[in-house]
Amino acid sequence: MSPWARWFRIPFWQRVLGAFVLGALAGWALGEKAGVWLQPLGTLYVQLIRMIATPLVFFAVIHAVSALRGQKSMAKLGGRTFLWFAVTAALAVGVGLGTAALTKPGMGVGQLQVASDFKPRQVPGPVQVLLDVVPTNPFAALAEGRMLQVIFFAGLLGFALVKLGDRTSRLRELVGEASEAMIQVTRFVLELTPLGTFGLIAALVGTYGFERLLPLGTFVLTLYLACALHVVFVYGGLLLAHGLNPLRFFRGAAPGMQVAFVSSSSFASMPVALRSVTHNLGVNRDYAAFAVPLGATIKMDGCGAIYPAMTSLFVAQYFGLSLSAPQLFIILLASVLGSFGTAGVPGTAVVMTTVVLSAAGLPLEGLGYLLAIDRVLDMMRTLTNVTGQMLVPVLVAREEGLLDLAVYNRASSNVGLEEPPSPAA
């Protein structure tokens, strides 16, 4: 057996985990030189992922809209998806508030300095956000990767093809073939995940330095704990309530979770999350093509729910303020609704936290204290985001009969070059 074949026989998650460990060791050994020598490997990988994300979503959504017309109502599927987005976000806020209330990360941290590059974000109003969903130039939206605008235009085009019926049958076939071609390109790019992981982690460990974490170590540990509790117990409990084995889910979702952790980008993780949901967990491909990209834009349990809730308590504790019951309710409401209201706005975590702190009447400069450790926080926040973006399609597919249980129950952890498993007899 050739070395190439032996490499591909190793499960995908083990290859990524091995690259993670080697990257950490390389970063520790090389120090700041790792950022110069090895960061380009990670940058190349992220650029490749971003290269495929927009055309993958564009063709997949057009194909999905036309394919789902005879299966399930798009309105019904969309409504259920949004409902679970909101429910899991509300639960995430509760976990964030509860964990921060117990650990009190804002107490006893000494005098903190606001980051020199901190500037309060200007948050667009809800009307402007809705207007920004509609692209003035669809080609510019495609070129610039504005995902909500791409989804809107692709969905509209898909409905147009359905309305025209047989007159566009050849175009629908062409779109389907283009979608298959992009899925194959995705398989190729995902095989570079171990290489990208190695470069990203080596650069992070080599250039970051643990001294930056020490003043806010309790906050970092609290965030990681809250996210872990939410992923394991909340997500696991929802899966059990739907009659699904959580261990199978986490095995199938592992590739998406790993890429999210090392890349700190829901957008960059979206192709592997989509591949994990369909190939590993058995969600109907046409429904997943709509739900996963939408989730990558507006479903942010880590950045938009847990982190703003925790930061609110951190700021209140640091400044010696007490939060009333109405303020806690405002934090909950702002976190859940704000994630939808700021969809598509860059810098989700900072924008969401700005919204929540402003709504609760807390000092915005408290956010500036956390920017020095934001990269380490963002790794776990993004892992939580992407896990939720994979969970909701599984739950809705289970409720609507769009989940292949045979595929789910054998839950592969490989998203690479091999063909998808054939359905069980």
Image (cartoon, rainbow, N blue to C red):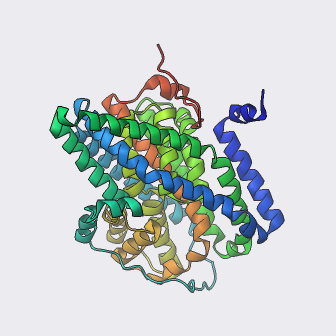
Residue ID at (76%, 72%):
32
Q: Position of residue 122 (x, y in %)?
A: 37, 79
Which quadrant holds the N terminus?
A: top right
Residue 403 can be seen in this image: yes
Q: Position of residue 317 (x, y in %)?
A: 51, 76
Residue ID at (71%, 52%):
20
Q: Position of residue 414 (x, y in %)?
A: 60, 35
| For residue 184, side relative to residue 157 (left or right) | right
Residue ID at (58%, 60%):
379
Can you say whether 285 is above or below 108 in the image? above
Q: Position of residue 44 (x, y in %)?
A: 62, 59
Residue found at the very far top of the displayed protein: 425
| For residue 168, side relative to residue 423 (left or right) | left
Quarter residue 341 falls in: bottom left
Can you say whether 340 is above or below 229 in the image? below
| Number of numbered markers | 0
Quarter residue 411 falls in: top right
- Asked whether 358 or 382 is in front, the reply is 382
Residue 75 can be seen in this image: no
- Asked whether 237 or 409 is in front, the reply is 409
Residue ID at (43%, 36%):
180
- Asked whether 102 or 193 is in front, the reply is 193
Quarter residue 47 falls in: bottom right
